[in-house]
Image (cartoon, helix red, strand yellow):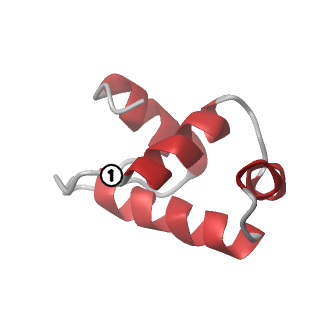
Amino acid sequence: MVRDSVHTQELTSREREILLLTADGRSAPAIAMHLQMSPSTVKTDLLSSFEKLGVYDRAAAVAAALASGLI
């Protein structure tokens, strides 16, 4: 689901990397293990990317990032 107003803030390289791994079907714990960080950090970065992309969930974030060429 997409919010009414889309933020134009650019994603960080880490947020893009996490979205790319999310698009690959990986869970937050699997991403955390792959990137050697805590799952809560992955979730925080995902939430930050949701806000920047103006979406509410992982599927919409991946779709918005793919559509805009961010990943």
| Residue found at x 21% / y 53% | 6
User: In this orientation, does residue 55 appear?
Assistant: yes
Which residue does the image show at 48% across and 58% down from the upper left? Answer: 56
Residue assigned mark 1 = 11
**Foreground pick, 42 / 60:** 42
Does 64 appear above or below 6?
A: above
Of residues 22 and 61, which is closer to you in this image?
A: 22
| Residue drawn 45% across the image and 44% down it | 16
Q: Is residue 66 above or below residue 65?
A: above
Give amino acid for label 1: Leu
Q: Which residue lies at the image location 75% right of the left edge and 60% below the top edge?
A: 36
Answer left or right for 67 relative to 10: right
Quadrant assignment, res 38: bottom right
Counting the numbered discs, the total is: 1
Expressed as whole percent of the image width and height from the top left, the position of residue 44 reads 56, 72
Q: Secondary structure at mark 1?
A: loop
